[in-house]
């Protein structure tokens, strides 16, 4: 997706929020913020936002000598949703269409995003998810595609959210829609904001039942020019892609030679406008693809 | 007032909004935005926001070869409020305390601010003003100070808003609280955002009845190190100061050797927190001054 000037504000906001919470002297904080301005003065301003965030966070990790700046947040979010899992499992089991209820929860879980300044309440969005309609609803096509696929790739996004991804995949597996061996889950290759890595996937038990790979990169999205050969190979061979979240949407939106189902909450007006929905809407949307649809 | 990192976001937002609306090629817009980043990478980040805005807008005026980037907005806002003036005069006349009603309208008029991204609806704020309480209410002290003063200075802020300033001054003059010859009104020395200049003061008729001076500078606030000798002299000699709006508040907040009554709407969380009120609140606040109070 094209970067708008509004994305630069959001990038600055995410960066300064992270800098502010560090236990370092004000002078050091100011140096880090000045670096941001200096970096931004030299880049192509149409660079997609996930690419910008990729460089910003790499710099902060190096300067702060910390490999995972959101480790504590990720742990808290994974624990929080795992603790609530029995309650969500019950809600899915009691739904008229458990596969749709689980899919909606997987989308609603995308609200747990520490990279955007969306201001929405996590608990409220998640608790209301099953009762809400999807603003774009390609869920029937998605479930048919999963049923017919011999292999597809599922691009994970955030901590906490992956617990819902697992609930969704487990649910459709129990219903006979998914053969677990047909799906490859992909996570970030290194810590970036609260996006999940192999460590998080292992922590919530995803790696026990599913084939999870690293995408080899640390952008908060999927920038195919940076991702690993292993990932790019799996991506190329997949019948279709399920892409969770806004960062993956922004980086894969213009890719037309592949079927991609975008599952996300629209968390800013630019993404919402691009899809033609309102901020806060839940989306399950097949891209405008040139590829054959199952 | 101390600049927080949040002010930098707001500065970027105001700058890009202005750049975006120019009828120039995208490449030129990107160059202007890159300049912003380059400029920001070199400054002391604790520089008060009005100082930053001062430099940003001076650069844009030069690069865009346009002396007044908000001329049309200012004209529209002045016209709009002047057209509604009979209705506001009637409301003030019918109020139990016309001087308080007019004072509240002068505060509410501060919502017409194109420099902050406050998102509040101008008409709604203004139409509800008379019925609302002030969140900080030093209006009785202010009116007493005006009554007792031999000379004071009134720092104007925005277009549209000055029509309400005139209504307030006229009202208290008619009520015998103000002797018009005791007040000097100060406006910006050159166009900056939608802040008023001598031209705007003349347009709404302020100069006919009041002594209006330029402050000799083009910051969207009152930065005494840049303002003219004439202004600084009037400021120093004044019994007290009435300071309208957020930019004047930010630049004069730390001045303790002068009685300053701040009249404004708190339009961002930083200013609201500094005063101890909520965003959107109407304020008439005497500063924590070391100077003798009338």
Image (cartoon, coloured by chain):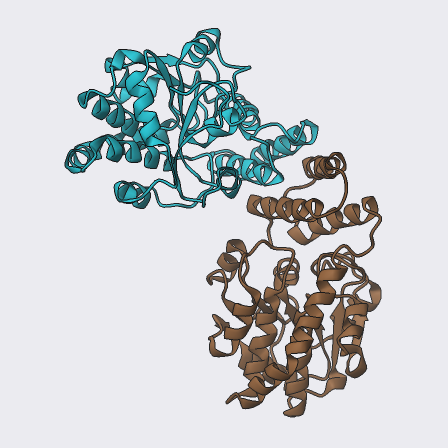
Chain colours: A cyan, B brown
* Position of the N terminus of chain B by quadrant: bottom right
* Whether residue A202 is visible: no
Q: Name the side, left or right, on which B177 lies relative to A167.
A: right
Q: Is residue A50 left or right of residue B173?
A: left
Q: Residue at x 37, y 12 (%)?
A: A213
Q: Residue at x 26, y 40 (%)?
A: A130
Closer to the camera, A208 or A29? A208
Nearest the camera: A169 or A79? A169
Res. A113 visible in picture: yes
- Left or right placement of residue A284 versus residue A78 in this view: right
Residue B95 position in % (x across, y down)? 52, 87
Front residue of B133/A216: it is A216
Q: How many marks?
A: 0
**In the depicted structure, whether residue B156 falls above or below residue B222:** below
Query: Compared to B43, does B125 lie above or below?
Result: below
x and y, in percent, of residue B37 in the image: 68, 36
Q: Position of residue A262 (x, y in %)?
A: 42, 29
Quarter of the image with the C terminus of chain B in it: bottom right
Q: Is residue A14 above or below residue A227?
A: below
What residue appears at the point 53 percent right and 15 percent down from the top-left corner? A226
């Amino acid at each position: 997706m094209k970067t708008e000037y509004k994305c630069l504000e959001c990038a600055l906001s995410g960066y300064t929020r992270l800098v502010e919470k560090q236990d370092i002297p004000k002078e050091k904080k100011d140096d880090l913020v000045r670096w941001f301005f200096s970096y931004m003065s030299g880049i192509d301003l149409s660079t997609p936002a996930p690419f910008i965030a990729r460089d910003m966070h790499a710099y902060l990790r190096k300067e702060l000598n910390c490999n995972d700046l959101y480790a504590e947040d990720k742990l808290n979010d994974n624990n929080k949703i795992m603790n609530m899992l029995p309650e969500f499992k019950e809600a899915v089991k009691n739904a008229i269409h458990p596969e749709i209820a689980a899919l909606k929860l997987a989308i609603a879980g995308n609200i747990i995003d520490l990279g955007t300044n969306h201001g929405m309440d996590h608990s409220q969005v998640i608790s209301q998810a099953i009762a809400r309609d999807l603003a774009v609803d390609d869920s029937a096509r998605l479930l048919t595609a999963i049923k017919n696929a011999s292999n597809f790739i599922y691009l994970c996004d955030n901590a906490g959210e992956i617990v819902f991804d697992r609930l969704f995949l487990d649910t459709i597996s129990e219903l006979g829609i998914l053969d677990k061996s047909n799906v490859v889950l992909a996570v970030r290759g290194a810590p970036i904001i609260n996006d999940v890595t192999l460590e998080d996937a292992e922590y919530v038990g995803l790696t026990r039942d599913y084939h999870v790979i690293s995408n080899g990169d640390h952008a908060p999205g999927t920038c195919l020019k940076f991702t690993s050969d292993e990932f790019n190979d799996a991506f190329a061979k997949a019948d279709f892609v399920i892409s969770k979240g806004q960062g993956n949407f922004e980086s894969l939106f213009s890719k037309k030679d592949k079927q991609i189902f975008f599952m996300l909450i629209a968390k800013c007006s630019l993404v919402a406008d691009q899809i033609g929905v309102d901020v806060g809407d839940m989306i399950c949307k097949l891209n405008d693809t040139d590829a054959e649809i199952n």
